[in-house]
Image (tube, grey):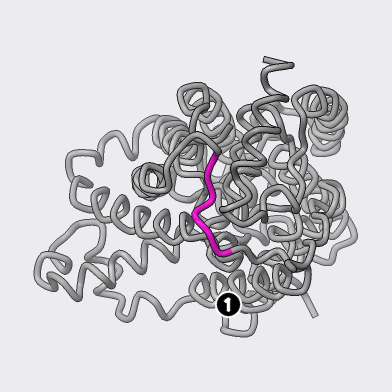
Amino acid sequence: MTFPIYDSGIASGLLSGVLFGYALEAAGFGSSRKLTAQFSLRDFAVFKVMFTAVIVAAIGLYVLRSAGVIGVNAVYIPTTFYWAILAGGALIGAGFAMGGYCPGTSVVGIASGRIDAVVFAIGMVLGTTVFAAVFDPLTSFYFAAKGPDAQTLPQLFGVPEWVVLLALVIIAAVGFRLGTIVERSRGGPLTAEEVCAPDDELDDHALRGSGRSAMHG
Amino acid sequence: MRETPKPFWSPLAAGTVLGLALLVTFVISGHGLGASGFITRLAAQSSDWVAPQATAENSYFGPFMKAGAPLMSWITWEVLGVLIGAWLGARGAGRISVKVERGPSITPTRRIGYALAGGALVGFGARMARGCTSGVGLSGSAVLAVAGFVFLIGFFAAGFAVSMMMRRMWQ
Protein backbone atom coordinates (compact mmCIF):
# COMPACT_ATOMS: atom_id res chain seq x y z
CA MET A 1 0.00 0.00 0.00
CA THR A 2 1.31 3.44 -0.88
CA PHE A 3 0.61 6.62 1.00
CA PRO A 4 -1.03 9.10 1.01
CA ILE A 5 -4.22 7.20 0.24
CA TYR A 6 -5.94 10.48 -0.86
CA ASP A 7 -9.07 9.75 1.12
CA SER A 8 -11.11 12.93 1.44
CA GLY A 9 -14.30 11.29 2.67
CA ILE A 10 -16.43 11.91 5.73
CA ALA A 11 -14.50 9.58 8.06
CA SER A 12 -11.17 11.06 6.98
CA GLY A 13 -12.41 14.61 7.67
CA LEU A 14 -13.96 13.73 11.02
CA LEU A 15 -10.83 11.88 12.21
CA SER A 16 -8.49 14.75 11.28
CA GLY A 17 -10.87 17.28 12.79
CA VAL A 18 -11.35 15.48 16.10
CA LEU A 19 -7.57 15.16 16.59
CA PHE A 20 -7.03 18.78 15.52
CA GLY A 21 -9.77 20.15 17.78
CA TYR A 22 -8.72 18.07 20.77
CA ALA A 23 -5.10 19.23 20.50
CA LEU A 24 -6.03 22.91 20.02
CA GLU A 25 -8.35 22.83 23.03
CA ALA A 26 -5.75 21.10 25.19
CA ALA A 27 -3.28 23.85 24.25
CA GLY A 28 -5.73 26.45 25.58
CA PHE A 29 -6.65 27.81 22.15
CA GLY A 30 -10.37 28.03 22.86
CA SER A 31 -9.63 31.14 24.91
CA SER A 32 -9.36 34.50 23.16
CA ARG A 33 -7.44 35.96 26.11
CA LYS A 34 -4.84 33.21 26.04
CA LEU A 35 -4.48 33.45 22.26
CA THR A 36 -4.08 37.24 22.17
CA ALA A 37 -1.70 37.21 25.14
CA GLN A 38 0.88 36.00 22.59
CA PHE A 39 0.95 39.48 21.09
CA SER A 40 1.34 41.19 24.47
CA LEU A 41 4.17 38.69 25.13
CA ARG A 42 2.49 37.42 28.28
CA ASP A 43 1.90 33.94 26.85
CA PHE A 44 4.03 32.25 24.17
CA ALA A 45 1.74 29.24 23.70
CA VAL A 46 0.77 30.25 20.14
CA PHE A 47 4.40 30.47 19.02
CA LYS A 48 5.48 27.36 20.92
CA VAL A 49 2.60 25.09 19.92
CA MET A 50 2.69 26.17 16.30
CA PHE A 51 6.45 25.79 15.93
CA THR A 52 6.42 22.40 17.67
CA ALA A 53 3.62 21.15 15.42
CA VAL A 54 5.35 22.40 12.25
CA ILE A 55 8.62 20.71 13.23
CA VAL A 56 6.99 17.40 14.27
CA ALA A 57 4.99 17.20 11.03
CA ALA A 58 7.90 18.38 8.84
CA ILE A 59 10.34 15.85 10.32
CA GLY A 60 7.64 13.16 10.12
CA LEU A 61 7.11 13.85 6.42
CA TYR A 62 10.88 13.87 5.85
CA VAL A 63 11.28 10.49 7.55
CA LEU A 64 8.29 8.94 5.74
CA ARG A 65 9.60 10.21 2.40
CA SER A 66 13.14 8.99 3.09
CA ALA A 67 11.76 5.57 4.03
CA GLY A 68 9.77 5.44 0.79
CA VAL A 69 6.42 5.32 2.58
CA ILE A 70 5.17 8.42 0.75
CA GLY A 71 6.23 9.68 -2.68
CA VAL A 72 8.38 12.73 -3.39
CA ASN A 73 5.65 15.07 -4.64
CA ALA A 74 2.87 13.27 -2.84
CA VAL A 75 1.50 15.98 -0.55
CA TYR A 76 -0.02 19.34 -1.40
CA ILE A 77 2.38 22.32 -1.32
CA PRO A 78 0.84 25.79 -1.78
CA THR A 79 2.30 28.23 -4.30
CA THR A 80 3.44 31.65 -3.10
CA PHE A 81 1.71 34.79 -4.35
CA TYR A 82 3.91 37.13 -2.33
CA TRP A 83 1.71 40.23 -2.03
CA ALA A 84 -1.62 38.50 -1.52
CA ILE A 85 -0.29 36.02 1.04
CA LEU A 86 1.65 38.69 2.94
CA ALA A 87 -1.36 41.05 2.95
CA GLY A 88 -3.80 38.25 3.82
CA GLY A 89 -1.55 37.03 6.63
CA ALA A 90 -1.33 40.59 7.95
CA LEU A 91 -5.10 41.03 7.85
CA ILE A 92 -5.52 37.75 9.74
CA GLY A 93 -2.92 38.86 12.31
CA ALA A 94 -4.71 42.20 12.74
CA GLY A 95 -8.15 40.59 12.97
CA PHE A 96 -6.79 38.01 15.43
CA ALA A 97 -5.37 40.73 17.71
CA MET A 98 -8.68 42.59 17.49
CA GLY A 99 -11.22 39.78 17.56
CA GLY A 100 -9.32 37.18 19.59
CA TYR A 101 -9.31 34.17 17.24
CA CYS A 102 -8.36 32.80 13.86
CA PRO A 103 -10.72 30.56 11.86
CA GLY A 104 -9.70 27.22 13.44
CA THR A 105 -9.45 28.49 17.00
CA SER A 106 -12.85 30.23 16.74
CA VAL A 107 -14.39 26.77 16.26
CA VAL A 108 -12.59 25.64 19.43
CA GLY A 109 -13.85 28.78 21.21
CA ILE A 110 -17.42 27.94 20.20
CA ALA A 111 -16.98 24.38 21.51
CA SER A 112 -15.67 25.88 24.78
CA GLY A 113 -18.78 28.03 25.21
CA ARG A 114 -17.32 31.39 24.20
CA ILE A 115 -19.99 33.77 22.88
CA ASP A 116 -17.34 36.09 21.43
CA ALA A 117 -16.19 33.16 19.23
CA VAL A 118 -19.69 32.75 17.79
CA VAL A 119 -19.79 36.46 16.91
CA PHE A 120 -16.28 36.22 15.45
CA ALA A 121 -17.41 33.37 13.17
CA ILE A 122 -20.36 35.46 11.94
CA GLY A 123 -17.87 38.26 11.22
CA MET A 124 -15.76 35.86 9.16
CA VAL A 125 -18.73 34.91 6.97
CA LEU A 126 -19.41 38.63 6.42
CA GLY A 127 -15.74 39.37 5.62
CA THR A 128 -15.62 36.47 3.16
CA THR A 129 -18.74 37.77 1.43
CA VAL A 130 -17.23 41.27 1.17
CA PHE A 131 -14.12 39.71 -0.41
CA ALA A 132 -16.25 37.92 -3.00
CA ALA A 133 -18.10 41.17 -3.74
CA VAL A 134 -14.87 43.09 -4.45
CA PHE A 135 -12.94 40.20 -6.01
CA ASP A 136 -12.96 41.59 -9.56
CA PRO A 137 -11.01 44.81 -8.82
CA LEU A 138 -8.66 42.82 -6.54
CA THR A 139 -7.81 40.15 -9.13
CA SER A 140 -4.53 41.65 -10.35
CA PHE A 141 -3.27 42.07 -6.77
CA TYR A 142 -4.46 38.55 -5.92
CA PHE A 143 -2.28 37.02 -8.63
CA ALA A 144 0.66 39.46 -8.41
CA ALA A 145 4.28 38.48 -7.67
CA LYS A 146 3.78 34.75 -8.13
CA GLY A 147 6.65 32.51 -7.02
CA PRO A 148 7.56 29.19 -8.68
CA ASP A 149 4.85 26.51 -8.35
CA ALA A 150 4.86 24.78 -4.95
CA GLN A 151 8.22 26.24 -4.02
CA THR A 152 9.74 25.14 -0.70
CA LEU A 153 12.39 26.73 1.53
CA PRO A 154 15.07 24.16 0.55
CA GLN A 155 14.45 25.06 -3.12
CA LEU A 156 14.41 28.82 -2.40
CA PHE A 157 17.70 28.74 -0.51
CA GLY A 158 19.25 25.90 -2.51
CA VAL A 159 20.10 23.82 0.55
CA PRO A 160 19.22 20.21 1.55
CA GLU A 161 15.98 19.72 3.45
CA TRP A 162 17.71 18.59 6.64
CA VAL A 163 19.51 21.95 6.85
CA VAL A 164 16.18 23.78 6.88
CA LEU A 165 14.78 21.36 9.47
CA LEU A 166 17.85 21.84 11.67
CA ALA A 167 17.54 25.63 11.35
CA LEU A 168 13.89 25.46 12.38
CA VAL A 169 14.74 23.34 15.43
CA ILE A 170 17.41 25.85 16.47
CA ILE A 171 15.04 28.83 15.99
CA ALA A 172 12.35 27.01 17.98
CA ALA A 173 14.73 26.10 20.80
CA VAL A 174 15.93 29.71 21.14
CA GLY A 175 12.35 31.01 20.84
CA PHE A 176 11.14 28.60 23.54
CA ARG A 177 13.79 29.74 26.01
CA LEU A 178 13.35 33.46 25.34
CA GLY A 179 9.56 33.08 25.34
CA THR A 180 9.55 31.36 28.71
CA ILE A 181 11.70 34.12 30.24
CA VAL A 182 9.56 36.93 28.76
CA GLU A 183 6.17 35.40 29.60
CA ARG A 184 7.17 34.76 33.22
CA SER A 185 8.36 38.35 33.60
CA ARG A 186 4.89 39.47 32.50
CA GLY A 187 2.89 37.27 34.87
CA GLY A 188 2.08 34.57 32.31
CA PRO A 189 1.38 32.13 30.89
CA LEU A 190 -2.40 32.25 31.40
CA THR A 191 -3.78 29.18 33.16
CA ALA A 192 -7.04 27.32 32.52
CA GLU A 193 -8.31 28.53 35.87
CA GLU A 194 -7.74 32.17 34.91
CA VAL A 195 -9.35 32.04 31.47
CA CYS A 196 -12.26 29.76 32.43
CA ALA A 197 -13.34 31.89 35.42
CA PRO A 198 -16.97 32.98 35.13
CA ASP A 199 -17.68 36.61 34.24
CA ASP A 200 -18.65 37.68 37.77
CA GLU A 201 -15.17 36.79 39.03
CA LEU A 202 -13.63 39.05 36.40
CA ASP A 203 -13.34 41.99 38.77
CA ASP A 204 -11.19 40.01 41.21
CA HIS A 205 -8.90 39.01 38.37
CA ALA A 206 -8.86 42.61 37.16
CA LEU A 207 -7.53 43.77 40.51
CA ARG A 208 -4.86 41.11 40.60
CA GLY A 209 -4.04 41.62 36.92
CA SER A 210 -3.66 45.39 37.15
CA GLY A 211 -1.52 45.01 40.28
CA ARG A 212 0.81 42.80 38.32
CA SER A 213 0.99 44.90 35.20
CA ALA A 214 1.61 48.01 37.30
CA MET A 215 4.62 46.25 38.78
CA HIS A 216 6.02 45.26 35.41
CA GLY A 217 4.67 47.91 33.11
CA MET B 1 -19.33 25.10 43.77
CA ARG B 2 -17.73 25.26 40.37
CA GLU B 3 -15.29 22.49 39.51
CA THR B 4 -11.71 23.64 39.03
CA PRO B 5 -10.69 23.27 35.37
CA LYS B 6 -7.80 20.92 34.64
CA PRO B 7 -4.63 22.72 33.52
CA PHE B 8 -3.87 23.11 29.82
CA TRP B 9 -1.22 20.79 28.40
CA SER B 10 2.29 22.12 28.11
CA PRO B 11 2.90 23.80 24.72
CA LEU B 12 5.44 21.08 23.87
CA ALA B 13 2.92 18.28 24.52
CA ALA B 14 0.02 20.01 22.75
CA GLY B 15 2.27 20.99 19.83
CA THR B 16 3.56 17.43 19.45
CA VAL B 17 0.03 15.98 19.36
CA LEU B 18 -1.03 18.72 16.93
CA GLY B 19 1.97 17.92 14.71
CA LEU B 20 1.10 14.20 14.74
CA ALA B 21 -2.54 15.02 13.90
CA LEU B 22 -1.27 17.06 10.96
CA LEU B 23 1.05 14.24 9.86
CA VAL B 24 -1.80 11.71 10.00
CA THR B 25 -3.92 14.10 7.91
CA PHE B 26 -1.20 14.35 5.24
CA VAL B 27 -0.76 10.57 5.13
CA ILE B 28 -4.50 9.93 4.78
CA SER B 29 -5.70 12.82 2.61
CA GLY B 30 -2.55 14.11 0.89
CA HIS B 31 -3.24 17.64 2.16
CA GLY B 32 -3.07 19.44 5.50
CA LEU B 33 -5.56 20.80 8.01
CA GLY B 34 -7.70 23.89 7.45
CA ALA B 35 -10.67 25.91 8.65
CA SER B 36 -11.36 29.00 6.53
CA GLY B 37 -12.26 26.84 3.53
CA PHE B 38 -15.39 25.86 5.42
CA ILE B 39 -16.22 29.52 6.14
CA THR B 40 -15.84 30.28 2.43
CA ARG B 41 -18.23 27.49 1.49
CA LEU B 42 -20.65 28.57 4.22
CA ALA B 43 -20.50 32.17 2.96
CA ALA B 44 -21.10 31.04 -0.64
CA GLN B 45 -24.04 28.87 0.44
CA SER B 46 -25.52 31.66 2.64
CA SER B 47 -25.11 34.14 -0.17
CA ASP B 48 -26.90 31.71 -2.49
CA TRP B 49 -29.85 31.49 -0.08
CA VAL B 50 -30.14 35.30 0.06
CA ALA B 51 -29.32 36.21 -3.54
CA PRO B 52 -28.99 33.17 -5.84
CA GLN B 53 -28.63 35.10 -9.08
CA ALA B 54 -25.92 37.49 -7.82
CA THR B 55 -24.06 34.57 -6.20
CA ALA B 56 -24.06 32.52 -9.40
CA GLU B 57 -22.75 35.53 -11.33
CA ASN B 58 -20.08 36.41 -8.76
CA SER B 59 -16.58 35.62 -9.99
CA TYR B 60 -15.45 34.23 -6.59
CA PHE B 61 -18.57 32.43 -5.28
CA GLY B 62 -19.89 31.44 -8.71
CA PRO B 63 -17.49 28.50 -9.27
CA PHE B 64 -18.40 27.05 -5.85
CA MET B 65 -22.10 27.10 -6.72
CA LYS B 66 -21.49 25.74 -10.21
CA ALA B 67 -19.67 22.74 -8.72
CA GLY B 68 -22.81 22.13 -6.64
CA ALA B 69 -23.50 21.72 -2.90
CA PRO B 70 -20.50 23.74 -1.62
CA LEU B 71 -20.85 22.41 1.93
CA MET B 72 -20.51 18.75 0.87
CA SER B 73 -16.74 18.78 1.25
CA TRP B 74 -13.93 17.27 3.31
CA ILE B 75 -13.37 20.61 5.06
CA THR B 76 -16.95 20.59 6.38
CA TRP B 77 -16.45 17.18 8.02
CA GLU B 78 -13.10 18.30 9.36
CA VAL B 79 -14.53 21.46 10.98
CA LEU B 80 -17.37 19.38 12.43
CA GLY B 81 -14.67 17.09 13.83
CA VAL B 82 -12.84 20.09 15.35
CA LEU B 83 -16.06 21.09 17.09
CA ILE B 84 -16.53 17.55 18.44
CA GLY B 85 -12.89 17.05 19.46
CA ALA B 86 -12.64 20.42 21.18
CA TRP B 87 -15.95 19.91 22.96
CA LEU B 88 -14.93 16.45 24.21
CA GLY B 89 -11.62 17.86 25.49
CA ALA B 90 -13.14 20.94 27.10
CA ARG B 91 -15.93 18.93 28.70
CA GLY B 92 -13.63 16.22 30.03
CA ALA B 93 -11.32 18.81 31.57
CA GLY B 94 -14.04 21.09 32.94
CA ARG B 95 -12.91 23.91 30.68
CA ILE B 96 -16.27 24.86 29.16
CA SER B 97 -17.06 28.42 30.22
CA VAL B 98 -20.09 30.12 28.70
CA LYS B 99 -19.27 33.82 28.56
CA VAL B 100 -18.11 36.75 26.50
CA GLU B 101 -14.40 36.43 27.12
CA ARG B 102 -12.75 39.83 27.55
CA GLY B 103 -10.19 41.82 29.45
CA PRO B 104 -11.20 43.52 32.70
CA SER B 105 -11.47 47.06 31.34
CA ILE B 106 -13.82 46.59 28.39
CA THR B 107 -17.60 46.15 28.33
CA PRO B 108 -19.14 42.99 26.81
CA THR B 109 -20.85 45.10 24.13
CA ARG B 110 -17.59 46.61 22.94
CA ARG B 111 -15.91 43.22 23.05
CA ILE B 112 -18.66 41.81 20.83
CA GLY B 113 -18.18 44.70 18.40
CA TYR B 114 -14.47 44.02 18.18
CA ALA B 115 -15.09 40.27 17.76
CA LEU B 116 -17.35 41.01 14.77
CA ALA B 117 -14.90 43.47 13.21
CA GLY B 118 -11.91 41.21 13.84
CA GLY B 119 -13.80 38.25 12.37
CA ALA B 120 -14.59 40.28 9.25
CA LEU B 121 -10.91 41.20 8.78
CA VAL B 122 -9.91 37.56 9.22
CA GLY B 123 -12.59 36.34 6.79
CA PHE B 124 -11.41 38.83 4.16
CA GLY B 125 -7.71 38.16 4.85
CA ALA B 126 -8.10 34.38 4.64
CA ARG B 127 -9.48 34.68 1.11
CA MET B 128 -6.68 37.04 0.14
CA ALA B 129 -4.04 34.65 1.54
CA ARG B 130 -5.77 31.59 -0.01
CA GLY B 131 -6.07 30.08 3.47
CA CYS B 132 -5.75 30.81 7.16
CA THR B 133 -3.43 30.15 10.07
CA SER B 134 -4.22 26.42 9.83
CA GLY B 135 -4.27 25.98 6.07
CA VAL B 136 -1.35 28.17 5.00
CA GLY B 137 0.50 29.05 8.23
CA LEU B 138 0.54 25.60 9.87
CA SER B 139 0.03 23.13 7.01
CA GLY B 140 2.04 25.21 4.51
CA SER B 141 4.98 25.61 6.88
CA ALA B 142 4.92 21.89 7.71
CA VAL B 143 5.63 21.06 4.04
CA LEU B 144 8.29 23.83 4.19
CA ALA B 145 6.38 25.87 1.58
CA VAL B 146 7.68 29.42 1.12
CA ALA B 147 4.01 30.48 1.21
CA GLY B 148 3.62 29.26 4.79
CA PHE B 149 6.51 31.33 6.11
CA VAL B 150 5.54 34.45 4.11
CA PHE B 151 2.12 34.11 5.71
CA LEU B 152 3.56 33.80 9.24
CA ILE B 153 5.73 36.91 8.75
CA GLY B 154 2.65 38.97 7.82
CA PHE B 155 0.58 37.39 10.58
CA PHE B 156 3.00 38.03 13.45
CA ALA B 157 4.08 41.51 12.24
CA ALA B 158 0.51 42.82 11.97
CA GLY B 159 -0.57 40.97 15.11
CA PHE B 160 2.06 42.70 17.24
CA ALA B 161 1.33 46.10 15.67
CA VAL B 162 -2.44 45.95 16.17
CA SER B 163 -2.06 44.40 19.60
CA MET B 164 -0.29 47.54 20.80
CA MET B 165 -3.45 49.50 19.99
CA MET B 166 -5.64 46.84 21.61
CA ARG B 167 -4.02 46.60 25.02
CA ARG B 168 -7.10 47.85 26.82
CA MET B 169 -9.28 45.09 25.48
CA TRP B 170 -7.32 42.18 26.87
CA GLN B 171 -5.45 43.42 29.94
Region rendered in magenta: B98-103
- Give the answer, above or below, for where A97 lies relative to B130: above
Q: Which residue corresponds to the image point at 72% horizontal and 25% vertical from the top-left?
A: A212
Query: Which sits in the foreground, B1 or B29?
Result: B1
In the image, what residue occupies the spot 30% across and 34% down? A141
Q: Residue A20 at what x, y percent from top left?
A: 68, 64
Residue furthest left in the image: B53
A22 or A99, nearer to the observer: A99
Horizontal placement of A165 versus B67: left or right?
A: right
- Image mark 1: chain: A
Residue B86: give x, y in percent of width and height: 66, 68
Query: Is B24 in the magenta?
Result: no
- Residue B102 on the magenta segment: yes
Q: Mark 1 points at which residue?
A: A8
Quarter of the image for residue A183 reads top right
Question: Secondary structure beneath disc 1?
Answer: loop
Q: What's the magenta bit mostly, secondary-structure-wise?
A: loop
Q: Which amino acid does label 1 sit on?
A: Ser
